[in-house]
Image: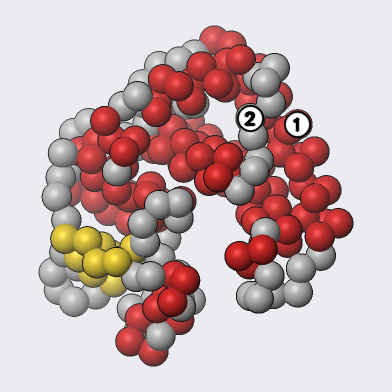
Amino acid sequence: MKLYGEDNPAPNPRRVRIFLAEKGAAVEHVRVPLRERAHKAEAFLEKNSLGQVPVLELDDGSFLSESVSICRYLDGLYPDPPLFGDTPKAQATIDMWIRRIEFQLMAPIAHIWRHTHPLTAGLLTQFKDFGESNRAHADRVYRWLDGELADRTFIAGPAYSMADIVALTTVDFGRMIGVAVPEDCSRVLAWLDHVSRRPSAAA
């Protein structure tokens, strides 16, 4: 297998690298330099017609894209530890939290990135007022998440899971582009410190 991706701070390829590190699994990595638009080259579009990373090339020559889908496939190959849960309820809860993080937190951070950051100015028509308006939404989500973490250590329950990987890469990307965790979100900050200390976080 080969994993096509990009170095930090690209959040989606990092999800898969963290997942693999948690599993203790090794996959060949092929860098696709986004700033050079390598993900839009004809050869790469044959691997993923959307021109996005990461992409996992399987041994049979087929390709999987979308970071969570890639990790679900890898979870089947490397079942321990079970980062998508080991009971129907745990699996559904983790899936719920992955979707919540992506829709509620990653979406406004992505809008801020696309519509306010100088690195994306040449890629689309930026509507900076719209981009900036998402900062208040991100703050509201962080405060909601802070309340949700009142009774547990990790995003989806008592065990580290794919939901934590999705959240960590989202939060770190947000911080990189200037979307900080509000200082009054002490539980989110404690969670962030905790998961950032895991060796996999350096992947």
Residue 194 sits above or below residue 10 on the image: above
Residue appearing at x 86%, y 56% in the figure: 129
Residue 8 sits above or below residue 101 on the image: below
Give the residue at the far top of this rendering.
151
Q: Position of residue 31 (x, y in %)?
A: 29, 66
Give 118 or 69, whichever is nearer the viewer. Answer: 118
Report if residue 110 is visible in the image. yes
Image quadrant for the N terminus? Answer: bottom left
Q: Secondary structure at mark 2?
A: loop
Image quadrant for the C terminus? Answer: top left
The residue pinned by badge 1 equals 140
Residue depth check, mark 2 versus mark 1: number of the one nearer the observer? 2
Give 66 or 189, whichever is nearer the viewer. Answer: 189
Badge 1: residue crowd in 10 Å (few <14, some 14–19, many ≥20) = some
Residue appearing at x 64%, y 75% in the figure: 123
Q: Is residue 197 left or right of residue 112?
A: left
Residue appearing at x 34%, y 63% in the figure: 5
Q: Secondary structure at mark 1?
A: helix
Q: Amino acid at mark 2?
A: Val
- Is the C-beta separation of discs 2 and 1 under 8 Å? no
Residue appearing at x 38%, y 70% in the figure: 33
Report if residue 148 is visible in the image. no
Give the residue at the far bottom of this rendering.
42
In the rendered structure, which disc, 2 or 1, sits on the residue that comes first in sequence? 1
Badge 2: residue crowd in 10 Å (few <14, some 14–19, many ≥20) = many
Q: Is residue 170 left or right of residue 107?
A: left
Q: Amino acid at mark 1?
A: Arg
Q: Position of residue 178 (x, y in %)?
A: 64, 43
Q: Is residue 105 left or right of residue 19?
A: right
Q: Position of residue 78 (x, y in %)?
A: 17, 43
The residue pinned by badge 2 equals 181
